[in-house]
Image (cartoon, rainbow, N blue to C red):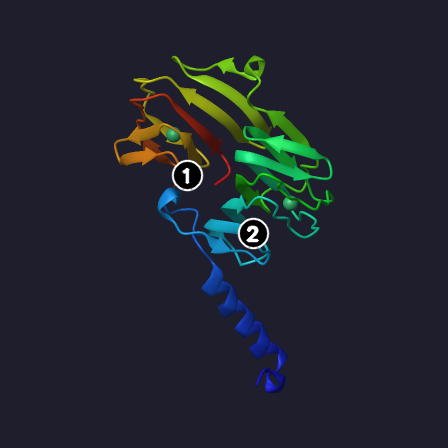
Amino acid sequence: MLFHLNGEKLKCLGFYEKLIHMLNMNFSKRVVIRTHNQTWKASPKNGVWRKPLSRENTEQGHATSIVRYDAGAHFSTHDHPYGEEILVLEGTFSDESGDYKAGTYLRNPQGYRHTPFSKEGCTLLVKLHQFKHTDNNRVCINTNDSSLWLQGQGNLKVLPLHEQSGASVALVKWPAGEHFKAHTHFGGEEIYVINGEFIDELGRYPAGSWIRSPHLSKHNPYVEENTLIYVKVGHL
Ligand SMILES: [Fe+2]
Ligand SMILES: [Fe+2]
């Protein structure tokens, strides 16, 4: 049937196909996903599974996902248009440049090609196609290195991971019972709860929760137990 369609109709079909696959791409909306309750979706490669959090299309463009490699799984060789940001959550993630244990933070810029795999299996937080075009540095940080952690406000401990053009990424450790001041998110805030439980006046977010709060959103967060979160601010 497609052979009889002209260029305009094909463009139109492409647009509707993209809409079908689009997920949580309205950055002015608050989104909360408890990823431990999501089911794994198969990727094009056997043994590589995903939980989509936001995406522009199935296999290209902006995407934020939890990704799992079964033991022995590998992915095809690929480039990274507008970059790839990875936080290794569990296991060991590998490519031809090395082996990256849980707690490793990676930024693979455009032009960096790799063929990733995992011998023992791993779980990752992955953000694709979200670098500024001027961001060309490869970054590899071992967040288990206690010398990298800084004293934050109150009793928070902070490990800055990246900063550019008003957007920044960090890990933040909250000791049990810590309360933070009420604040407004200029440029939005994205949080992934690595362990413990993050809480604010809008809800409770156990480990595995992903919370994306839009520009000018506000909250007054606290924790009751030791909690570790990934935080990205100023990018929405
Ligand atoms: Fe990659
Ligand atoms: Fe916040």
The structure residue drawn at horizontal position 66% and vertical position 44%, both measured from the top left corner, is 116
Of the pair 26 and 78, the residue shown nearer to us:
78
Nearest to N terminus: mark 1 or mark 2: 2
Helix, strand or loop at mark 2: loop
Q: Is mark 1 within 8 Å of ligand 2?
A: no
The structure residue drawn at horizontal position 48% and vertical position 41%, both measured from the top left corner, is 236
Residue 45 coordinates in the image, percent (x, y): 60, 56
Q: Identify the disc placed on residue 20.
A: none
- Marks 1 and 2 in Cβ contact (< 8 Å): no
Amino acid type, label 1: His
The structure residue drawn at horizontal position 59% and vertical position 33%, both measured from the top left corner, is 165
Ligand 1 sits in quadrant: top right
Left or right of residue 170, residue 132 in this image: right
Picture mark count: 2
Q: Identify the disc placed on residue 47.
A: 2
The structure residue drawn at horizontal position 27% and vertical position 36%, both measured from the top left corner, is 203
Q: Is residue 30 visible?
A: no
Figure check: 164 above or below 18:
above
Amino acid type, label 2: Gly
Q: Identify the disc placed on residue 215.
A: 1
**Quarter residue 106 falls in:** top right
Figure check: 207 above or below 29:
above
Of the pair 53 and 219, the residue shown nearer to us:
53
Q: Residues within 10 Å of mark 2 (few under 14, many from 20)?
A: some
Of the pair 179 and 37, the residue shown nearer to us:
37
Q: Residues within 10 Å of mark 1 (few under 14, many from 20)?
A: many
**Quarter residue 72 falls in:** top right
Q: Nearer the viewer, mark 1 or mark 2?
A: 2
Tell me how far mark 1 sits from mark 2, CA to CA.
37 Å
